[in-house]
Every structure is written in C-alpha cells, then in structure tokens.
Image: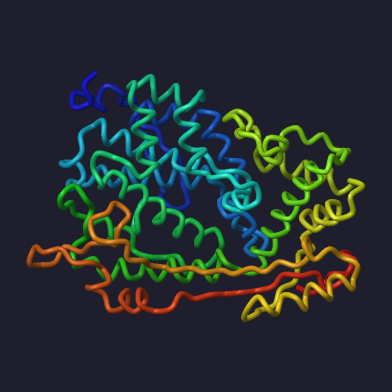
Amino acid sequence: MDKNEFTLEQYRLHESRVIRDAIHGYITFEYLPIWQLIATAEVQRLRRIKQLGGTYMVFPSAEHSRFTHSLGVYETVRKMCALDEIDKHLNDYEKLTVMCAGLLHDIGHGPFSHTFEGAFHTNHEEMTRRMILEESEVHHVLKSVHEDLPLDVANVIAHKASKPMIVQMVSSQLDADRMDYLLRDSYFAGVTYGEFDRSRILRTLRIKDDRIVFKYSGVQAIEDYILARYHMYYQVYFHPTARSYEHVFQLIAKRLTVLYEQGYHFQTNIQYLLPFISGEKMSVAEYEALDENVIYYYIGEMQNEDDAILSDLCQRFINRHLFKYESINDASEIEEYRKKTIEKGLDPDYYVVDDEAIQVPYKHYGVGKHTGEIEILMEDGTISTLSDTSHIVNAILHSKPKIDRKVFFVRNSNWRKETDE
C-alpha cells in the first residue's frame, strides 16, 4: 500500500475507548493499532517499571509507572495531531507513525528506569528500537498495518524521519515526552515545581518548513516550562536521598558482576540476571523478562548470600538503610572518606561514591536541527530563537551550569545502627 493512500479511517474503532488518567482526564483511543499495542507484552511490562527509579524513597507517592507516562505521551501526541497546524502537514500514515512512537518510546527501559542503565550499561533507546524491529508482539502489530511501519516508528525514536516535525513531537527541547513527565512527576511527587500551561503552549504551536515553531505570544508559557524543568531536576530528580538509593542499586550490580567474574557460587538462582552481568549480547526476550518484581525478589534473596558486601548492600536496598552524604568541592576530598571507610573495615570501592549532578535546563543546539533550540515565530513572520527572544532563557543559557557534587558514604560499620536521615 502506498503510504500517501493510507487512511486512518479504515482502522477506526467502532466506538472509541478511553482510559481515565490523573493528568489528562480521559486518554482517548480511536484506532485499532494503538489499542492493540497497549495489549502487547512489551507495553504491559511498563506497568512493572517505575517512572522515577528511587525517587519514591523521598516522595513516597511517586510510584507511578512508565506505562502511565507512555499513555500520557501518546495522548499529548494525539492532541498535537488534532491541531489544524499539524493536521495539514502530516498524512494519515505519518500521524499513526508518530502516535505509535509516542506510545512506544520507553518500552526499552529496564527496572528503575535510568538507574538500571547506569548499573548494567544498557541503553533504553537502543533496546526500544530492537523491541520494535525484532521478534516481539509490538513488531507484529505494527507490521500487520504496514510492512514499513516498524522501521518508520523506530526511526522516529532514533531521531530520523522524513520531516523534522515528526521527531520534534516526540523528542526535542519541547516535546510530548517532557510535557507529560514534568506534569506527571510533579503531580505524583506531591510538588508544584513541574507545573506549566501545556494547553497554551500547544495553542501557539505552528509549522514552518516542516519543523515546529511557536508564536511569540506563547513565550511566557514556554519560559514557565523551562523553569519547571530546572526546578524539578534539583528539587526532585537530583534529590540526594534518591541518588543514594540509586547508588546502592548500582553497587549491587557492580558486586554481582565482580563475583560472577571471580567464579563465585551464588546460593540464589540468578538466571534472569546472567545476560546482564555476563557481558554477552542479550536477546530481546531476555531483556523483557527482567522487571522490578524480579529485581526485588533477587535482592531479597541475596540478603542471605555468603558474600558480606553483596548481602549488606542488598539489606540496605530492601530496608532503606542508605548511604549518608555530604557536599564536597573536588575529588581531592574523597581520599579522606576512603581512609575512614578502610578504618571501619569496609571496602571503599563499595562504600564511598563520588557523585556529581549537573543539569543544564536549556542548551543551544543550533537552529533548524530537529533537536535544536526552540524557535519562535515573531509577529512580523520572521523566526527567532527562544534565547534571543526571552531574557529569562538567555540568562539561563549563558549562566554556568549548576553543579551539585556530593560524597556518599557509610557513617557506621554496622548497617543496623544507621539511623540518622
């Protein structure tokens, strides 16, 4: 079938379906392929992956999943496609492609999301593309619609598409992904830092030369969005207690790998972890088999391992006896913490962590690239960059990145005596 002759109407559900959502109200599903994708094992697995990793250790209500976020990104993309500006620049095949990309953009995430990538050196975007292109339920649903659809959806996630606007809708400085996770994470964390006027931003969206720009009248709403990102990173995403929890998880992964390489005999049957610690390329099926339920089971069992370090780290993870932290200025200060840790009889390679959190809320990538700077349609019809239009964003762009450097360490040698927060 010629893609230009493809029509969404042939896949329209007899009656649209809805899912109630805390952020969007009702999320609407009008087309069969989208509804079928939700029922796939790859998308349903996201119910068992937390959106914010260890952040719920600080904000207990932030236990929402990658599944609800993915639905939210799809809904934002769907609303974009319904805009007159988008509608007249995309054909039906392109609309379905970008809606599928919005729904599927995170299916490659591992347990505890980004924390898992640091622990086991995986890349969720690469795994997402593999799940779409290789043997999977998602692949079969997409291919049943059009032979090229799996590749076209994967290309959107890989930042490749025939029109820059298609990629921009899912991945850019101001995209459906960021708009959903800021509002959703803020809501479930119980804070207001991530709030901004999404409807105003969408109302001012325009298309110029197949790329997304925004009317000058929307600059204030976009400024609020940029500031929301800035505050969410430092108040929520980079919270030191959440970072401590994530470091403990990463150290468990490190210890598992070292023990495996040393030929250690695990009392726990860790067959689902072997593809991740063996260093060999894993299959999509092996990757999909691991979710947070499996991880929690393994860590609970490994509290009883003979290896003292692995056992202790697992107990810390399960019972929230996390590392303490202090602010430092440079790496030279780490040595003192390492010496004190050795004096306590602990291995500093597992009980001292030098951590640096850097977040640049807005970068200039260059005008016209699909992940480039946000562009503003001026009242005279010319195009300007957001940083040239907004004094607030210009100040952020030219300011030094905020760096939060901390050392994480164990204050007492007996983990059961760690009581201070």
Residue 192 visible within the image: no
Instruction: Count all numbered tags in the image, as a single digit.
Output: 0
Foreground pick, 244 / 158: 158
Point 46% across, 36% down: residue: 129
In the image: residue 148, left or right of residue 69: left
Compared to 56, does 358 lie above or below? below
The quarter in which the C terminus is drawn is bottom right
Foreground pick, 330 / 72: 330
* Colouring rule applied to residues: rainbow
Q: Position of residue 409 (x, y in %)?
A: 76, 70
In the rendered image, which quarter is residue 382 located in? bottom left
In the image: residue 385, left or right of residue 72: left
Q: Residue furthest left?
A: 380
Point 41% across, 37% down: residue: 18
Foreground pick, 180 / 190: 180
Q: Position of residue 47 (x, y in %)?
A: 58, 40
Foreground pick, 126 / 381: 126
Q: Position of residue 250 (x, y in %)?
A: 69, 54
Point 36% across, 47% down: residue: 170
The quarter in which the N terminus is drawn is top left
Point 41% across, 46% down: residue: 73
In the image: residue 97, left or right of residue 233: left
In the image: residue 178, left or right of residue 82: right
Residue 136 visible within the image: yes
Q: Position of residue 397 (x, y in %)?
A: 35, 73
